[in-house]
Each structure stands twice: as structure tokens, then as C-alpha cells.
Amino acid sequence: MLSRRLIVCLDVKGGRVVKGVQFEGLRDVGDPVALALRYEEEGADEVTFLDISASAEERETLWDLVQRTAERLFIPLTVGGGVRTVDDVGRALRAGADKVSINSAAVATPELLTGCAERFGAQCVVASIDAKREGDRYRVYTHGGRRPTDLDAVAWAKECVRRGAGEVLLTSIDRDGARTGYDLELTRAVADVVDVPVIASGGAGRAEHVRDALTLGGADAALVAGILHDGLTTVGALKTLLRDSGLPIRSTS
Amino acid sequence: MRVTLFDYGAGNLHSLAKALTTAPDVEVRVQEDPLRALDTDVLVLPGVGAFGSAAARLAPGREAMRKALDAGLPCLGICLGMQLLFEESDEGAGAGLGYFQGRVTRLAARHVPQIGWNDVEEDAALESAKLASVYYAHSFVCRAMEPREVVGWTTHEGDRFPASVRRGKVLGVQFHPEKSSRVGVRFLQAFLKEVAP
């Protein structure tokens, strides 16, 4: 049976892993290659690099970083952030990414998803959607959650899949960093209408939240970041609880 | 040992190349010309891309490659590379190598592509490495005509398909060993050891 996945996300900038600290900007927390390898060793099923570089100079370090990681990491690596064209996706894949997540650029140019799927295959095209609750609906935001669009998240997810996305990475802006649990209604609403895997993101505070995203939310995978980086829990502890809840989880022992 | 990856120009070969070099005395080469790719001790058909474009790249060397495999050249086909060892695919036009009889068709499941870790049942691909959960990322599967050549099975939502096929020193795997962590790297090492000339 296909296992449910635990995906570890690392924010990278200028070739380093960084962490946002309230009112203080970004803090350097380590070497992406070393951290990715450590999470593989602990049992993570995949690693995602989200590039939050602000400048082209900083972004140039990403491809080198992806290559150095791919040469040593033997689990799937997804790269997202700042991908705008089919050529950008090709470059990320050649550098060593297995999948590329596309967010703002897909909203601006939906044909980009189709172009990438036709050239590289749907399995490496991840539609990344940032959504914010408004009443009983969810509005899609772009540019790191700063810019509202006219799109409804559930309809947009369907559209992304129709255009060729092989996975949907769904982030709740309301829950991101709040550690109060994933937005289960949002996750379920999207998982119910698309036929590709849905990755729940935003809100993990403890293992039960991850379990709920995979059971009540119907997600195939859950993205986890802060609670691991801050040492509040471990990949092993999360997977133990998921397994004990009866979910199919890859064993690494 | 010279191990050559036939590059159809579609994507990431870094992880696969590095995983193969973890075996002793291995020199990995990447070759875009299908005829030149045959000047090797072990041929690897990697797993990224679409059937139609890969078959087109393969076409000028297809007959020579088929003959080399029939003559005993060890070969590992991964994902799309496994599919190229079969005859034809619903994914795209063009001919595969036809080393294995059968057609490549779409997974019969609600959730396609299958992306993630799944188990291999009845695993008999290699003597010295046993498979546990391995990583898949695919929409198509190989419907092998000859059941004896299937050396492992996987099930996705009710569709049971060959995880691996083998005849002699030619092995095709639908999963990605280079993305299957320690289990997969050990599998690659064991394959090279088993087929090494």
C-alpha cells in the first residue's frame, strides 16, 4: 500500500538555511546539505527547499546548492520559490531536483504548468497554492502570501491538475507558523476534488496535527518545518505516532 | 567497471550517478548517443522523461542496443528506463527495445501519478539485496506478457503491476532506487555486484 509521507521543508536563502524570527528578520540556522542528510537519516520521506532569496545574486547559489544536495541525498528533493519559466524548471531538474513547485508564476501564466508537464512529466510538477480563509471560502494569494488574487483555492487546485500538475502543495496562510494544526477543512475540500496527491502545509504544532491532516484532512503527505527545526519533536517521534494511529508509514529501522 | 547512463536529456542524473559510484571500482559515464552508450560494461536507462521523446532519442541505436542486451550486456532500466525495455507505450509514439514482451499502459487507479513509497511483494529481483518500501513517481506501468519474468509486484489502489522484471542480466524496475534511501542504494550496489563482468 502507498505510504503517507512526511516531508521536511527547509527555507533557503543565499545558499543557507534560514529561519524567520519575529521582528528580527532572518537567522542563519545551518547548511542545507547537512540538514537534508540529517533528516533523511532520521526517516524523512522527502525534503523540500523553499528558496526565499530576495535577489538574483542570492538565487544563483540555489542551483549549486541543489546539485551538491542531490549528489548526497537519496530521497526525493523538491525545489520551489522563484520558478517562473519552463527553462527555470528545466534548470532545477538538471541541477538535481526531482520535483519543482510553482506558485505565483502558475497564477500569472497557467500554461506554465502544462508546458512543464509535457516536457518533464506531471510527476515533477507541483502546484503550490497559498490560501486564506474568507467566510466559508478560501482565497488564493501569491508572492509569499502578500498579494490576493480573484481565485478560489478549491477551483484553482482543480484547474492546476487539469493543466498538468502531478501534486498539490496546499498551504494555509492562516495557520502557517501558528502551530494550532493544519486547516483540515481546506485540506479536505481540495483532496476531495483532485485526483493527484495533496500535501498539507501550515500549522503543525504536534504529531496529532500531522495525523489529523492525513486522516480527517485526507492529505497524502504533510509538510513539516518549524517544529522539527526547533527541536520540539523528531521525524521518528512523528512517524511513530502516525504508525500507531494505523496509517501506512514507511519504516526506516 | 564502466557504467554508462544513457541520457535522453530530460532531467536529474546526479543522484543516480552518485548512488552508482558508491559501489566499488565504478566509473560512471553519461552518454547522449545511444550507439556510443553501448561501449560499456553496464548500461543504465535512467528514469526521468516521457516515453515518446526518449524513444525518439533511442531510435538511431535501438536495434544495436537490443542486440547488445540479447548478447549479454548487463542493463538496468529505471522507471521510464524499464518501460523502454518493453515494446510500446500508451504515453507516446515510438518503439521501445522490445526486450520484454508487453505494453506500457496507464495506472488503473483514481490517484495518478502514484507518488510516494510503496512495498514490493514477492521480491526476487536480486539475490543479495531485499527490497522494503521504495519510492515511486509514475503514471504508467509495464504489463509484462511473460509472468515468469516478473520478479516483484506492487499494488496501487487495486492495480497490481510489475515492480521489477528480469531476464538474465537485464533488470527493469518501476521504482527509483536512487531515491529510495539506504534500501535503494544497497539495491544498486547489489545489482552491479551480481552482473559485473
Image (cartoon, helix red, strand yellow):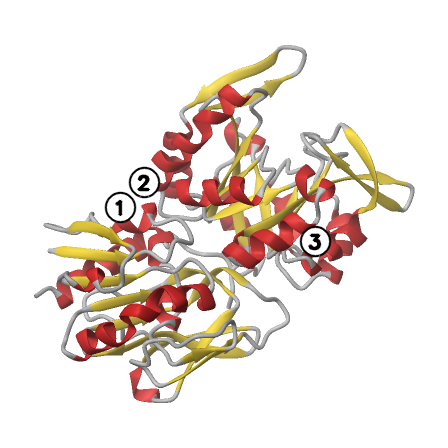
Instruction: Name the front one of labels 3 and 2.
Output: 3
Q: Are marks 3 and 2 on the same chain?
A: yes
Q: Who's the residue at 73% across and 31% down the image?
A: A145
Q: Would you say B24 lies left or right of A157 here?
A: left
The residue mark sitting in front, 3 or 1, is 3
Q: Is mark 2 on a helix, strand or loop?
A: loop
For badge 3, the amino acid type reads Cys
For mark 1, what is the residue? B18
First of labels 3, 2 by sequence position = 2
| Image location of residue A136, percent across then percent down | 90, 46
Residue that badge 2 annotates:
A72
| Residue occupying the point 35% across, 51% down | B181
Label 2 environment density (alpha carbons within 10 Å; few <14, some 14–19, many ≥20): some
Residue at the disc numbered 3: A160
Q: In which quarter of the image is residue B43?
A: bottom left
- Whether tag 1 and tag 2 are in contact, CB under 8 A, the answer is yes
**Residue A67 shows in the view:** yes
Please give the chain letter of the residue carrying mark 3: A
Mark 3 → mark 2, Cα distance in angstroms: 32 Å
Comparing A115 with A29, the one in front is A115
- Mark 3 and mark 1: Cα distance apart in space: 34 Å
Residue at x 27% of width, y 63% of height: B34
Residue type at mark 1: give it: Lys
A120 left or right of B96 in image: right
Residues at circles 3 and 2 in contact by the CB criterion of under 8 Å: no
Give the label on residue B150, or none: none
x then y, percent, for residue A139 = 83, 41
- As rendered, which of A236 and A159 lies closer to the eye? A159
Is disc 3 in contact with disc 1, using a CB cutoff of under 8 Å? no
Viewer-proximal residue, A43 or A80? A80
